[in-house]
Image (cartoon, grey):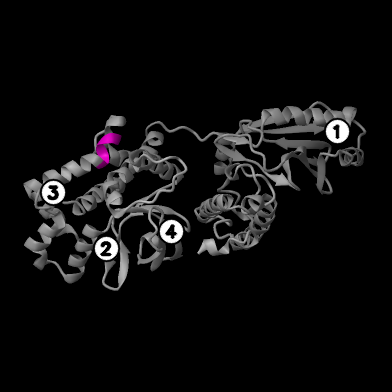
Amino acid sequence: MAHDLEGLIKFVTSDETWHQRLADVLEEHFLPALEAFDLDFEDLGDLLGEDWPMVLWGGGLEDLLGRTFGPNNENAADAYLKRQGSKENTQTRTYIAGLRDAPISLYEVSAIVPGKTMVLRDLLTDVEPIKVREHSATQMLQQWDRIAVRVVTQSDHNVISGALLPFDPDAVAMFEDGLRAVLNLKANDELRLTQDQLRRSAPLFANAWLFAHLPNLLDPEPPQISNSDGDDLVFHELCFSLASGVTQKQVSQKLSQAADLVATGPKDWTWLAVDKPGGTRRGTGLVLGNAMSGNSVLGSLTLKGKALTLSVDSAARAERGEALVRELLGDLVKPPLTVIQTVEQMMADDSLQSGVAEEEDIPPALARQLAQEYLDQHYRDTLDQPIPALGDKTPRQASRSAAGKKKVIDWLKTIENRSARQTGSPVADYDFSWIWDELDLSDHRK
């Protein structure tokens, strides 16, 4: 629910003393990032969008309301309510007093009822999870999102303040590193703060958020995408024409004898790395890769008409794949013709074709069913594959120890949150509850 703070803002900005104190607080929130990136506050609107600078400014105002100044412990909220509080209704007065008393913290979002309520778990204290009433944010946030915000008590319920900052994993890591440095904590020390420490850490939330977002906005780098071998993602399609007189049956018989080719249809084969587990990932950045029967998928082969087509996702795999086909088929095929596409070219082609492909699109219900079936199999295989984030243990292995269980819970929340954020995709509403049940972790999903 929105609260009208126009009177309070006018009071703070028109009073010379409070205006200067607000400026000093805002400097703590913005100056480190502005100096580091040689920016003015006005530049933030162009980089972040016109709304975010005001959200950050609002966070500075909320921080001011929680501070006291001078020997008499002067407070902006108290001063305003004393001088002009009679002009405000009871709800607004209660909200301003609540802002004064509520420190900012980092919360994990769960149990979202869009347009109505959500549950917030404080990640920096041992306070019990709390339900808040909220209209707009509950329609944008997803399960397991993390946000920096203040929780304000209003008579018989709780609300959140207006200065809400969503914290992605990079911002969370940036904030936690900064907090550990300020508190002189070791990397493995649990972050548990007092109310006073939370109040004094308020500028760190804004700083971490800005330092996590600004670098890529100022100097955007395309994401590094690789396959599970660590090769740059470049799609190769090798077309081997069958030699004169050679039949599809001859080619099929040869391919069916190969240990690293698995038939997935009458004229289709999947090429597997039989000596490499599917859970092993050597790439950096965004790593794309599929697995089948516990082995990494290297490519696919399709026999159509008088040609055999090999599709792979890197130059190295194209070279290995050509050698494999040569070894298996010899003179049965001619030297291949190769078509190469980068990720950018493939995306551009998809964009151009999207307008004419609507009639050929898979019906939404079928797309959802296929996605659900694929994800069921994918995650069932994943439970028995080593995961780097789990110390190269499988989820089943890691969940057997207290330390490993915590890592598995964080891992599950991450993949569930990422799926939920793919709005409009068939995977957005995938039900992960069976995985939590399978690992006996259902109690940690509430």
C-alpha span from label 2 to label 4: 20 Å
Nearest-to-viewer mark from 3 and 1: 3
Q: Which mark is residue 69?
A: 3
Observer-nearest of 170 and 300: 170
Image x and y of residue 54, in percent: 26, 48
The stretch drawn in magenta includes residue 327: no
C-alpha span from label 1 to label 2: 70 Å
Disc 2 designates what residue? 2
Q: Which mark is residue 109?
A: 4
Q: Determine which quarter of the picture holds residue 174.
A: top left
Q: Are marks 3 and 2 in contact (CB under 8 Å)?
A: no
Circle nearer the N terminus (1, 4): 4
Q: Which residues are magenta?
A: 29-33
Identify which amino acid the numbered label 3 is placed on. Phe
Circle nearer the N terminus (2, 4): 2
Image x and y of residue 280, in percent: 67, 39
Residue 338 visible here: no
C-alpha span from label 1 to label 4: 58 Å
Relative side of 162 to 334, left or right? left
Nearest-to-viewer mark from 1 and 4: 4
Image x and y of residue 165, in percent: 35, 50
Image x and y of residue 115, in percent: 39, 66
Identify which amino acid the numbered label 2 is placed on. Ala
Observer-nearest of 173 and 19: 173
Please name the predominant secondary structure of the magenta segment in the image. Answer: helix
Count of number-bearing discs: 4
Give the crowd class for mark 1: few <14, some 14-19, many >=20 residues within 10 Å. Answer: many
Circle nearer the N terminus (4, 3): 3
Disc 1 designates what residue? 242
